[in-house]
Image (cartoon, rainbow, N blue to C red):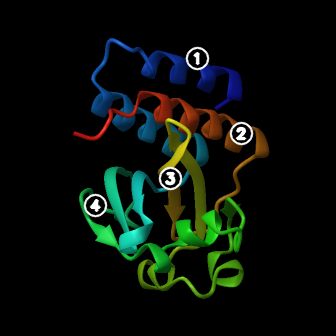
């Protein structure tokens, strides 16, 4: 899929008249399609509580499954390694690049993408994708997904 055709499809997903959950679910499906990653998800980080909560997920393959509404230790998840600068935003060699992530070991991550999501300028969480097999993702696709993470942050509802 070309980046320009993906951009047009993403713009359609971000229709402000649509409910936020529908936007996120459709966006996660597009991110999976564009990258080839079998699972994509939006996670909220609760770093003080050492917790990461999967808010929305999209699973396409049979190699990995990340359910919604689960909580994992932030300090053991791949996102924390990326957020802290101990790992790149994307790798197709998680075992070699992030060997200390217990979550990655447990789930069998081979490829991983993690981009920050900010709400009102504050770190909220991450837009992620993963696969149990090596996947190559172009720099232009990663930059487009980074823009999606920014747009999600702009649409995030305030906490009650």
Is residue 55 or residue 45 the one in the foreground?
Answer: 45
Q: Where does the N terminus fall, quadrant-wise?
A: top right
x then y, percent, for residue 106 = 42, 84
Q: Which residue is mark 3?
A: 126
Query: How many numbered discs sit on the rendered protein?
Result: 4
The mark that comes first in sequence, 1 or 3, is 1
Tell me which label, 1 or 2, sits earlier in the chain: 1
Nearest-to-viewer mark from 1 and 2: 2
Residue 67 numbered tag? 4
- The residue lying at 48 percent from left, 36 percent from top is 153
Tell me the SS state at disc 2: helix
Q: Quadrant of residue 146?
A: top right
Q: Residue furthest top?
A: 17
Of pointers 4 and 2, the one earlier in the residue sequence: 4
Of the numbered discs in the image, which one, if any, rests on residue 150? Answer: none
Compute the Cα span from label 4 to label 2.
Answer: 26 Å
Work out how far the residue at label 1 is from the one at label 2, CA to CA, in angstroms. 15 Å
Q: Which residue corresponds to mark 1?
A: 8
| Residue designated by label 2 | 143
Q: Residue 84, how many percent across, how many down?
A: 65, 69
Image location of residue 53, percent across then percent down: 33, 61
Report whether 128 appears left or right of 93. Answer: left
The label nearer to you, 1 versus 3, is 3
Instruction: Tell which tag, 3 or 4, sits nearer the viewer.
Output: 3
Disc 3 is placed on an element classified as: strand
Mark closest to the chain's N terminus, 2 or 3: 3
114 w.r.t. 85: above or below: above
Measured along the vertical axis of the image, is residue 40 above or below residue 31?
A: below
């Amino acid at each position: 899929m070309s980046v320009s055709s993906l951009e047009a499809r993403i713009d359609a997903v971000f229709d402000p008249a649509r409910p936020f959950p529908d936007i996120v679910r459709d966006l996660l499906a597009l991110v999976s399609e564009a990258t080839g990653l079998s699972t994509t998800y939006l996670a909220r980080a609760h770093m003080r509580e050492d917790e990461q909560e999967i808010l929305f997920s999209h699973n396409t393959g049979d190699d990995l499954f990340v359910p919604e509404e689960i909580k994992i230790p932030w300090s053991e998840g791949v996102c924390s390694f990326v957020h802290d600068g101990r790992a790149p935003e994307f790798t197709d060699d998680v075992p070699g690049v992030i060997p200390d992530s217990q979550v990655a070991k447990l789930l069998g991550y081979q490829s991983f993408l993690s981009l920050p999501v900010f709400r009102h300028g504050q770190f909220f969480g991450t837009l992620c994708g993963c696969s149990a097999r090596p996947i190559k993702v172009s720099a232009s696709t990663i930059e487009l997904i980074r823009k999606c993470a920014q747009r999600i942050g702009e649409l995030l509802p305030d906490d009650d």
